[in-house]
Image: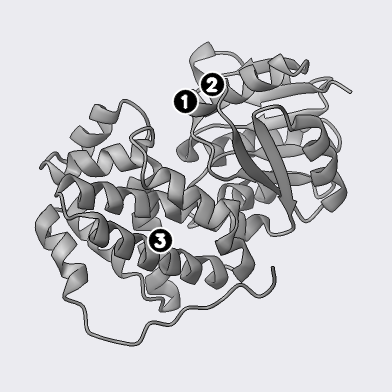
C-alpha cells in the first residue's frame, strides 16, 4: 500500500530517496530550508516523516517540530554524524524532543546517492527498537534496487554510520598520498576496530559493526570517488585546508565535524581513537598529511585484538 511521505531535506540524499520512493508509487511531499517556508506544513496527513537534513540542522529542527508532531507518525532518520555540541547521534537529538509514542527508525548502510539515482542495486538497514514499525517500513520501502534489512540496534547503527565518515577521510588522505593498497587495507581494518570502540562505548551491539551499517558502509564510503568524505580526504592530502577541501567537494562533509566530536567523546570516556586523533591533528594544522599518515605507522607495537560478532 502506498504511503504518504514527508521528506525533510532536499540535499543529494533526501532528493534521491524522494525520487526512489516516488517511482515506487508513494506520495511525496518535501521541505528544504531554502524554501523559506515552515517545515511543519508538510507534516499534516502523512504516514511517515523522513529526516534527511545535514547533521548541523537536526537539533534546531527537532526542537521546532517536537511539539507539533502529528500523533504517533513514525520518524525515519537518514542523517549520519555526531553533534559537535551535544556529542549525540541524530536519533538521540530527535528523541530529546519527540513525544515518547513516536516510533524512531534509522536508515543507514552502503547507499551512495549517485549510484541509487542511476538505478544500481544497493542494500541498507532499518534499525529500530520498535521492530513492528521497522518491518512495516521494510515491506513498504524496499524496491527493485534498494533491499532493506532490519535490526534492533539504532544507536550502534548511527555510531557506525557516523564514524565511517572519519575513516573515509583517512582513506582519502592515504590514497591521495599514494601510500598503496597495503596501507589502505591496514587503515580500514584498524578503522573498523576504532568504529567498534565508539559503537560499543555508546551502548551499541558488537554484531552491528559487521553488518551493512558498519563494514558495508565503510567499504563503500572509504573506497569510492562518489563519497564526499573520501574525495575530501584526497583534497586534504594535496595540501588544501579543510574549508577549501569542503568547498572543492561542493557539499557538506560530515566527517570533518564527526572526527572532532568522536575525539571529544574519547577524552570523556578514556577511549583510544588514534585515527580520529591524527585526522583532527591534520585538520587543526598540527600535522601535515604525510606526518598524520606516518604517525599511525609509528605507534607502539601491541597485540591485535579482534572481537568477533556476538552472534551471526
Vertically, is 239 above or below 48? below
Disc 1 from disc 2: Cα separation: 5 Å
Q: Nearer the viewer, residue 52 or 220?
A: 220
Within the image, what quadrant is residue 151 found in? bottom right
**Between disc 2 and disc 3, whose residue precedes?**
2
Of residues 173 and 204, the one drawn nearer to the viewer in this rendering: 173
Residue 86 drawn at (x, y percent): 49, 55
Residue contact between numbered discs 1 and 2, judged by CB atoms under 8 Å: yes
Q: Residue at x 67, y 31 (%)?
A: 50
Residue 114: which disc? 1
Q: Residue furthest front?
A: 181
Residue 117's label in the rendered image is 2
Q: Can you say whether 1 is above or below 121 in the image?
A: above
Image position of 124 with respect to 25: above or below: below
Around disc 1, counting alpha carbons within 10 Å, would you say few (fewer than 14), some (14 to 19), or many (20 or more)? some
Residue 266 is tagged as none
Please tell me which residue is depicted at 53% across the width and 43% down the height of the picture. 110
Please tell me whether mark 2 sits on a helix, a strand or a loop: helix
Q: Is residue 82 visible?
A: no
Image check: 296 left or right of 13? left
For residue 233, side relative to residue 260 (left or right): left
Tell me where residue 45 appears, x and y as whole percent: 84, 20
* Residue bearing mark 3: 262
Rendered residue at 46%/39% (across/down) = 56
Q: Position of residue 16 (x, y in %)?
A: 56, 23
Amino acid at each position: 500500500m502506498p504511503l504518504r511521505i514527508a521528506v525533510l531535506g532536499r540535499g543529494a540524499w533526501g532528493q534521491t530517496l524522494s525520487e526512489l520512493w516516488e517511482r515506487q508509487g508513494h506520495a511525496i511531499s518535501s521541505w528544504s530550508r531554502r524554501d523559506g517556508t515552515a517545515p511543519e506544513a508538510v507534516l499534516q496527513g502523512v504516514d511517515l516523516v523522513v529526516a534527511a537534513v545535514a547533521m548541523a540542522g537536526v537539533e534546531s529542527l527537532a526542537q521546532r517540530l517536537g511539539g507539533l508532531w502529528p500523533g504517533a507518525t513514525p520518524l525515519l532518520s537518514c542523517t549520519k554524524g555526531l553533534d559537535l555540541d551535544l556529542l549525540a547521534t541524530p536519533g538521540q537529538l530527535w528523541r530529546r524532543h519527540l513525544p515518547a509514542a513516536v516510533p524512531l527508525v534509522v536508515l543507514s548502510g552502503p547507499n551512495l546517492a549517485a549510484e541509487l539515482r542511476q538505478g544500481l542495486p544497493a542494500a541498507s538497514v532499518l534499525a529500530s527498537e520498535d521492530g513492528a514499525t521497522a518491518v512495516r517500513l521494510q515491506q513498504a520501502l524496499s524496491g527493485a534496487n534498494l533491499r532493506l534489512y532490519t535490526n534492533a540496534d539504532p544507536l550502534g547503527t548511527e555510531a557506525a554510520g557516523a564514524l565511517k565518515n572519519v575513516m573515509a577521510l583517512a582513506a582519502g588522505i592515504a590514497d591521495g598520498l599514494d601510500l598503496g593498497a597495503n596501507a589502505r587495507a591496514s587503515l580500514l581494518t584498524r578503522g573498523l576496530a576504532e568504529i567498534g570502540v565508539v559503537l560499543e562505548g555508546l551502548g551499541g551491539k558488537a554484531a552491528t559493526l559487521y553488518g551493512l551499517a558498519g563494514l558495508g558502509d565503510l567499504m563503500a564510503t572509504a573506497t569510492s570517488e562518489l563519497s564526499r568524505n573520501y574525495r575530501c580526504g584526497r583534497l586534504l592530502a594535496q595540501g588544501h585546508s579543510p574549508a577549501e577541501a569542503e568547498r572543492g567537494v561542493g557539499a557538506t562533509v560530515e566527517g570533518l565535524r564527526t572526527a572532532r566530536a568522536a575525539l571529544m567523546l574519547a577524552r570523556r570516556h578514556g577511549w583510544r581513537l588514534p585515527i580520529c586523533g591524527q585526522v583532527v591533528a591534520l585538520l587543526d594544522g598540527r600535522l601535515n598529511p604525510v606526518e598524520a599518515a606516518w604517525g599511525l605507522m609509528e605507534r607502539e607495537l601491541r597485540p591485535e585484538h579482534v572481537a568477533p560478532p556476538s552472534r551471526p
